[in-house]
């Protein structure tokens, strides 16, 4: 079973968008050439085709890869931090595929199992506003915490199906925006900066020896392969 790279899912999305955009550009040039050299009405199709391709690749549009590029950078930063912790007994599964979506990282440490949701977002720090819940700047951000909770629950269920009963802690790691006091909890979810990740990974409630960590790692890799 081959382990996936940090951000591989986003890399594949970016590549697909680039291929579609490239095919659209090639089609436009093909129509232009057909209009210039053989069939002049084809040249009239070029104008709306150019407009359509331009519309799709603009900021925030369907073929704009900027959001995925930012997310990829964040996942790679977190992945590199996990690699540095390998000598301390940390095993990591990156880009774990689920029935719906994926988990950015799962870290298996001597202190427990952690489902890590990475956010590489600008626009103000993460904090809690009374009556509003999790915020990032002036924007509600509870959906990010909810995603982290769902990821942890799904990882827990995957392991439980294989007879492994272990607590899975949800982490929401910000690799760009600041976090109030560097780290805080909102319900079950631990919201923190990348610099606080190492501390969080060794504060879990479990005590997992090397053989049990390896079993969890291999079980998650097998589950990942089964969903692809």
Image: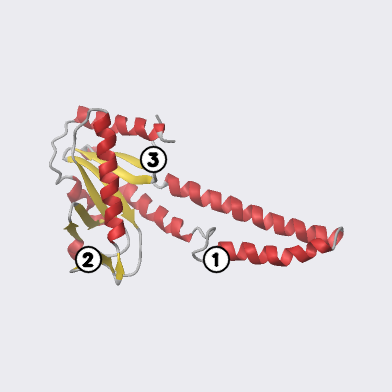
Horizontal side, residue 29 vs residue 186: left or right: right
What residue lies at 73% left-to-right and 64% top-to-bottom? 46
Q: Earlier in the sequence, mark 1 or mark 3?
A: 1
Q: Earlier in the sequence, mark 2 or mark 3?
A: 3
What residue lies at 69% left-to-right and 66% top-to-bottom? 48
What residue lies at 59% left-to-right and 50% top-to-bottom? 19
| Pointer 3 residue | 99
Look at the numbered discs 2 and 3 and tell me whether their residues touch, using CB distance below 8 Å: no
Q: Secondary structure at mark 2?
A: strand
Quadrant occupied by the N terminus? top left
Disc 2 versus disc 3: nearer the observer:
3
Residue farthest along the bottom direction in this orientation: 138
What residue lies at 19% left-to-right and 33% top-to-bottom? 165
Look at the numbered discs 1 and 2 and tell me whether their residues touch, using CB distance below 8 Å: no
Picture coordinates of residue 100, whole percent (x, y):
39, 44
Q: Quadrant of the rendered structure where residue 50 is? A: bottom right
| Pointer 1 residue | 58
Look at the numbered discs 1 and 3 and tell me whether their residues touch, using CB distance below 8 Å: no
| Pointer 2 residue | 127
Q: Earlier in the sequence, mark 1 or mark 2?
A: 1
Can I make out residue 86 in this image?
Answer: no
According to the image, what is the colour scheme of the structure? secondary structure
Q: CA distance from mark 1 to mark 2?
A: 31 Å
How crowded pointer 3 is (Cα within 10 Å; few <14, some 14-19, many 20+) is rated as few
Picture coordinates of residue 97, whole percent (x, y):
38, 40
């Amino acid at each position: 079973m081959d382990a996936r790279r940090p951000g591989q899912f986003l890399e594949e999305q970016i590549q697909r968008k680039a291929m579609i955009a490239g095919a659209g550009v090639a089609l436009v040039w093909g129509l232009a050439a057909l209009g210039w050299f053989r069939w002049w009405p084809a040249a009239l199709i070029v104008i709306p085709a150019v407009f359509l391709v331009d519309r799709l690749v603009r900021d925030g549009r369907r073929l704009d890869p900027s959001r995925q590029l930012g997310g990829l950078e964040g996942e790679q930063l977190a992945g590199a931090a996990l690699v540095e912790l390998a000598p301390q007994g940390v095993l990591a599964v990156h880009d774990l595929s689920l029935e719906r979506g994926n988990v950015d990282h799962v870290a298996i440490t001597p202190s427990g199992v952690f489902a890590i949701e990475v956010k590489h977002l600008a626009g103000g720090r993460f904090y809690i506003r009374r009556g509003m819940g999790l915020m990032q700047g002036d924007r509600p951000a509870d959906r990010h915490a909810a995603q982290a909770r769902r990821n942890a629950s799904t990882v827990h269920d995957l392991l439980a199906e294989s007879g492994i009963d272990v607590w899975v802690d949800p982490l929401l790691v910000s690799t760009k925006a600041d976090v109030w006091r560097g780290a805080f909890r909102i319900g079950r979810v631990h919201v923190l900066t990348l610099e606080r990740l190492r501390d969080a990974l060794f504060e879990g409630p479990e005590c997992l020896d090397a053989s049990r960590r390896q079993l969890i790692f291999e079980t998650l890799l097998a589950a990942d392969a089964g969903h692809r």
